[in-house]
Image (cartoon, rainbow, N blue to C red):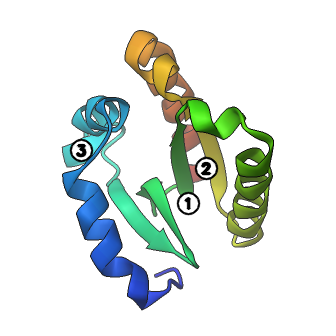
Amino acid sequence: MERYNRNLKPFSRTLRTHMTDAEQALWHRLRRKQLQGVQFYRQKPLLSFIVDFYCPAARLVIELDGSQHAEADIATQDKVRDTALTDLGLRVLRFDNRQVLLEMDAVLAAIDAAITERKA
């Protein structure tokens, strides 16, 4: 089990009930071990962050980015976050919300490939 800030649990529960359209669409395809039989968690606290999706079997984090992530200060925060998660031995995949909504098959193919690579 990965370390996390326990104070984030109530906030992560709130985020689960207010998912974006892209998060809901991807969750519909990841939940119940639909992809390679691996379990995904949504809005999972890790370290001092809440990641959108986490697959412990593949040590994989999936982040969905809205348009605000193009701003310089948020992009910098994303890099810091990705580095901290990578330092734990996790792989971070980032997808744009629009990409998830319009190119779901390509997104799922990238996630599937990452799972295969990480489980090997």
Q: Amino acid at mark 3?
A: Arg
Q: Is residue 2 above or below residue 11?
A: below
Crowdedness near tag 2: few (<14), some (14–19) or many (≥20) residues, C-alpha within 10 Å: some
Compare marks 2 and 3 and give the one earlier in the sequence. 3
Q: Are marks 1 and 3 in contact (CB under 8 Å)?
A: no
x 37%, y 59%: residue: 43
Distance CA(mark 1)–CA(mark 2): 7 Å
Q: Locate residue 28: give its quadrant.
A: top left
Sequence-wise first label, 1 or 2: 1
Amino acid beneath label 2 = Arg
Question: In x, y percent, where is residue 65?
Answer: 55, 37
Q: As rendered, which of 66 and 102 lies closer to the eye?
A: 66
Position of 98 compared to 30: left or right? right
Q: Amino acid at mark 1?
A: Arg
Q: Secondary structure at mark 2?
A: helix
Q: Between disc 1 and disc 3, whose residue precedes? A: 3
- Classify 10 Å Cα crowding around label 1: few (below 14), some (14-19), many (20 and above): some
Name the residue tied to disc 2.
118
Q: What residue is shown with label 3?
A: 31
Instruction: Note whether residue 113 is visible.
Output: no
Q: Is residue 109 visible?
A: yes
Farthest residue, direction top? 102
Give yes or no for contact between labels 1 and 2 (Cβ–Cβ under 8 Å): yes
Task: Give the CA distance from mark 2 to mark 3.
Answer: 19 Å
Residue 67 position in % (x across, y down):
58, 30
Identify the secondary structure beneath mark 1: loop
- Determine which quarter of the picture holds residue 113: top right
